[in-house]
């Protein structure tokens, strides 16, 4: 294992670029969260519309956090990681949506009402 | 509260027999006795030979991926013996006049442990072990990304297997089959410790498998030699990657479902009870969310093995590399879209079943692509029928038959007729025996020299193949027939005389399979005895094609003296074509390997004792061991002195020694491949 370099390179452009990415990620996450809180508590929109917008905000925040903290982007270096994350989402959606579908279908056949 | 929980004298294996001596309790006591005597005999052997110390310092504490792999395979072999013996006892039970010599509960325990053991403690450790040995060597890595975690995975699997063995000696295993569906496995209908044995042995091993999956995937992503792009990876590494990803995602639903079942049983929850809003159908759903990908976890590594054995013994490049890679990826994704076909009859609407039926038939397509790839690799090749090649050929033939019956079962209307019958039992054995065991046997015969430096005896290897192959057909083809005649699975006995002739044939087949297993034990024994004449120190005894064959046999602890730079898909074939006997060294540098440590073993054994305590509801002891387990993890976290260095000089010496050995090894021809003239590497065509 390589020894930790005593020069942390805190003056380099690379470091500043990376730092900016973290700060952006943090700031945007806070803004998006606060927006969600305001929407949920403010009563400006109807319940259904508020739910949808909060959902969209959540997905946006997810994407931003992957970009800022997990260093995912469309660059060639990050491509394998990006594929893995997309594949992960595909599987989770398959499992979660599949389970809901199967159980709701079963419930409908037993007259249990909504699951 | 009793400190020993629900444990009492009646749980000790011999007591039921003493109280009520019947053949059934006698067999149970005998099995428990074999475990106890076997353990004692092993301890005695180790003491007499003075092997305790080397066992500890060379093996148990080792973090070397090759040794961990070997230990996985040994675990799998031990459990395979038990699994096959159980199968033979069940076959004997069904041919003896009704109601047979086993009690119904005892028979139910047997098919439950048989299934649980074969999937979780034979197939899983077998493929994990083979991946451990081979995958790093194929991608030019010196070890797994997380060697310590690798050892933890191993010992957790051993712990799980130990619990299943313990169920022979203390208490009972469950009687609800390897799938353990509630409500039958709920606390009301299965009040004893059997289901808890199932839950906690699986909890240990499934955590181990999840960790292994993470380890494999990260190793492939981070540790490939420079220049080895994903599309230059050997197929076995590709199938390992897909299997690893399936392990990471598919083990989770099982772990969650079994822990939810544990909460239902012990903590009064209602996930899977009809009362209080639970839904037992969700257990089947979650179990098969794991269970179907699991099938492909099992089978993909075997596909990888065949993709190396067949080109090697056909003397040809693998046909259609790219299509094989994409077929593997397609199978990995599709394996998450078909789980409902395991419960077509649970009551879903027709449309839902139809969609999953079509998805199931679709998955046959990429699998078919692979079979054509292998066939076309063999086409016009110079075939040499080694044991490994025989198992591969036997696989292709048999697996296609199993695949055809699988596509039949994918049709929900046919599934309704054959559901829960022996037709189904014949189908999945027809997939898993050739698809997993034949693949793993081929892999062991093929790659064995990497670990031990000598080949396995061919004569006994071929005998074992024919016994397994013919035994398989005799044991399972009759089950297709009586399955279609209406024989249900999991029956302790049949009263229809029409089944009997078929069951007798199946019994004979089971005995032949047992003979195949015996032949393999003899094969190893004979090979160890004759190891001098089977030595292949120069490595590459079969004119192999992968990077792993560029190393001497046995492979040294550090694997590669220098990390090779890869410029093509088959760097070793290219080097040999240029007349080279070693791959040119790059740069010799000091390397760091993890030091041996007993901590993974200790951690996992503490976890195992904790799990045993949970099975018998010894809450206090379980809590103590749970804390102790995390203490060992903390100890490791504060350990900074965990590496040792191998100097560049030592690596250079290793390289020079290997080069000298290779250059002085006398040449041999393909005709001498399986004789003592084959000292490795220098196989050449007869001109």
Image (cartoon, grey):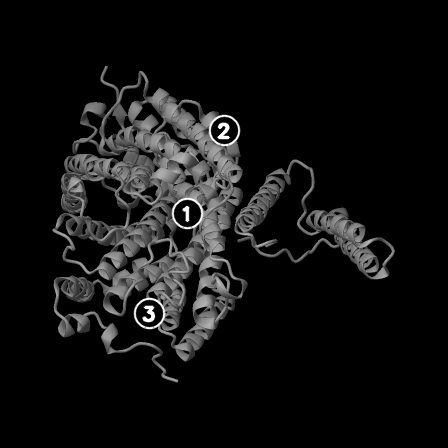
Q: What distance separates the C-alpha of mark 1 from that of mark 3? A: 61 Å
> Can residue A84 be seen by looking at this rendering?
yes
Q: Is residue B19 left or right of residue B67?
A: left
Badges 1 and 3, same chain: yes
**Looking at the image, is mark 1 or mark 2 earlier in the sequence?**
2
Q: What distance separates the C-alpha of mark 1 from that of mark 2? A: 26 Å
Q: Position of residue B656 (x, y in %)?
A: 35, 39
Crowding near pointer 1: few (<14 within 10 Å), some, many (20+)?
A: few
Q: What residue would you read off at disc 3?
A: B192
Q: From the image, which quarter does the N terminus of chain B lie in?
A: bottom left
**Looking at the image, is mark 1 or mark 3 earlier in the sequence?**
3
Taking the spot 27% from the left edge, 19% from the top edge, the residue there is B382
Tell me the subunit letter for badge 3: B
Q: Is residue B155 left or right of residue B499?
A: right
CB within 8 Å, label 3 to label 2: no
Tell me the subunit letter for badge 1: B
Q: Position of residue B597 (x, y in %)?
A: 39, 63
Badges 1 and 2, same chain: yes
Residue B649 is marked as 1
Q: What distance separates the C-alpha of mark 3 from that of mark 2? A: 60 Å
* Residue B432 placement: quadrant: top left
> Is B448 or B415 nearer to us in this picture?
B415
As helix, strand or loop, the secondary structure at mark 3 comes to loop
* Residue B439 placement: quadrant: top left
Q: What residue would you read off at disc 2?
A: B567
> Is A115 or B426 nearer to us in this picture?
A115
Q: Position of residue B509 (x, y in %)?
A: 17, 40
Crowding near pointer 3: few (<14 within 10 Å), some, many (20+)?
A: some
As helix, strand or loop, the secondary structure at mark 2 comes to loop
Mark 1 or mark 3, whichever is nearer to me: 3
């Amino acid at each position: 294992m390589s020894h930790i370099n005593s020069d942390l390179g805190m003056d380099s452009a690379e470091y500043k670029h990376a730092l900016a990415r973290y700060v952006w990620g943090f700031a945007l996450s806070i803004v998006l969260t606060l927006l969600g809180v305001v929407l949920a508590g403010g009563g400006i929109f109807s319940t259904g519309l508020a739910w949808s917008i909060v959902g969209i905000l959540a997905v946006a925040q997810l994407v931003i956090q992957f970009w800022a903290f997990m260093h995912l982007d469309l660059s060639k270096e990050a491509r394998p990681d990006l594929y893995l994350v997309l594949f992960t989402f595909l599987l989770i959606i398959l499992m979660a949506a599949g389970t809901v579908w199967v159980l709701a279908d079963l419930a409908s056949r037993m007259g249990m009402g909504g699951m | 509260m009793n400190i020993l929980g629900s444990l009492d004298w009646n749980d000790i294996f011999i007591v039921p027999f003493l109280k009520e001596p019947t053949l059934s309790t006698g067999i149970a006591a005998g099995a428990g006795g074999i475990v106890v005597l076997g353990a004692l005999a092993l301890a005695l052997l180790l003491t007499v030979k003075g092997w305790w110390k080397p066992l500890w310092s060379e093996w148990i504490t080792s973090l070397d991926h090759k040794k961990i792999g070997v230990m996985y395979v040994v675990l799998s072999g031990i459990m395979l013996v038990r699994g096959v013996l159980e199968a033979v006892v069940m076959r004997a039970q069904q041919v003896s006049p009704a109601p047979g010599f086993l009690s119904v509960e005892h028979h139910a325990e047997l098919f439950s442990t048989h299934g649980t053991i074969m999937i979780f403690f034979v197939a899983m450790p077998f493929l994990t072990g083979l991946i451990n040995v081979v995958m790093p060597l194929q991608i030019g890595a010196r070890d797994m990304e997380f060697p310590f975690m690798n050892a933890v995975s191993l010992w957790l699997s051993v712990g799980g297997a130990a619990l299943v063995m313990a169920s022979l000696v203390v208490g009972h295993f469950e009687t609800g089959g390897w799938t353990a569906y509630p409500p039958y496995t709920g606390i009301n209908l299965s009040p004893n410790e059997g289901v808890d044995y199932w839950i906690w042995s699986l909890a240990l091993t499934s955590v181990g498998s999840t960790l292994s999956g993470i380890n494999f995937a990260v190793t492939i992503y981070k540790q490939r030699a420079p220049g080895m792009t994903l599309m230059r990876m050997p197929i076995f590494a590709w199938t390992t990657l897909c299997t690893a990803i399936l392990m990471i995602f598919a083990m989770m639903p099982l772990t969650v479902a079994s822990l939810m079942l544990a909460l239902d049983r012990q903590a009064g929850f209602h996930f899977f009870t009809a009362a209080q809003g639970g839904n037992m159908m969700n257990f089947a759903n979650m179990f098969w969310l794991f269970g179907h990908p699991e099938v492909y976890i099992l089978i993909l590594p075997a596909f990888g093995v065949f993709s190396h054995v067949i080109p090697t013994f056909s003397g040809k490049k693998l046909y259609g590399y790219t299509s094989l890679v994409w077929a593997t990826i397609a199978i990995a994704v599709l394996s998450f879209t078909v789980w409902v076909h395991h419960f077509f009859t649970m009551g879903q609407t027709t449309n839902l079943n139809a969609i999953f039926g079509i998805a199931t038939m679709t998955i046959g397509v990429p699998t078919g692509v692979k079979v054509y790839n292998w066939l076309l690799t063999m086409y016009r090749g110079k075939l040499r029928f080694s044991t490994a090649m025989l198992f591969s050929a036997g696989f292709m033939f048999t697996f296609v038959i199993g695949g055809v019956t699988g596509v039949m079962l994918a049709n929900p209307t046919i599934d309704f007729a054959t559901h829960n019958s022996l037709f189904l039992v014949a189908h999945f054995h027809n997939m898993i025996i050739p698809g997993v065991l034949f693949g793993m046997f081929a892999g062991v015969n093929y790659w064995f020299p990497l670990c031990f430096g000598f080949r396995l005896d061919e004569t006994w290897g071929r005998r074992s193949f024919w016994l397994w192959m013919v035994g398989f057909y005799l044991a399972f083809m009759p089950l297709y027939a009586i399955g279609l005649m209406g024989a249900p699975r999991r029956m302790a006995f049949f009263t229809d005389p029409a089944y009997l002739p078929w069951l007798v044939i199946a019994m004979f087949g089971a005995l032949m399979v047992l003979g195949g297993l015996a032949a393999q034990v003899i094969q190893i024994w004979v090979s160890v005895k004759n190891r001098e004449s089977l030595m292949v120190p120069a490595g590459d005894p079969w004119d192999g094609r992968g990077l792993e064959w560029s190393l001497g046999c046995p492979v040294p602890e550090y694997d590669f003296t220098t990390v090779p730079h890869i410029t093509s898909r088959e760097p070793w074939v290219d080097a040999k074509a240029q007349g080279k006997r070693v791959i040119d060294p790059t740069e010799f540098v000091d390397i760091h390997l993890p030091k041996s440590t007993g901590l993974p073993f200790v951690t996992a054994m503490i976890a195992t004792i904790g799990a045993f305590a949970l099975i018998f509801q010894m809450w206090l002891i379980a809590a103590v061991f749970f804390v102790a387990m995390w203490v060992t993890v903390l100890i490791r976290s504060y350990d900074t002195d965990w590496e040792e260095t191998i100097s560049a000089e030592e690596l250079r010496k290793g390289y020079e020694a290997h080069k000298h050995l290779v250059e002085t090894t006398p040449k041999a021809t393909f005709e001498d491949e399986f004789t003592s003239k084959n000292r490795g590497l220098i196989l050449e065509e007869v001109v």
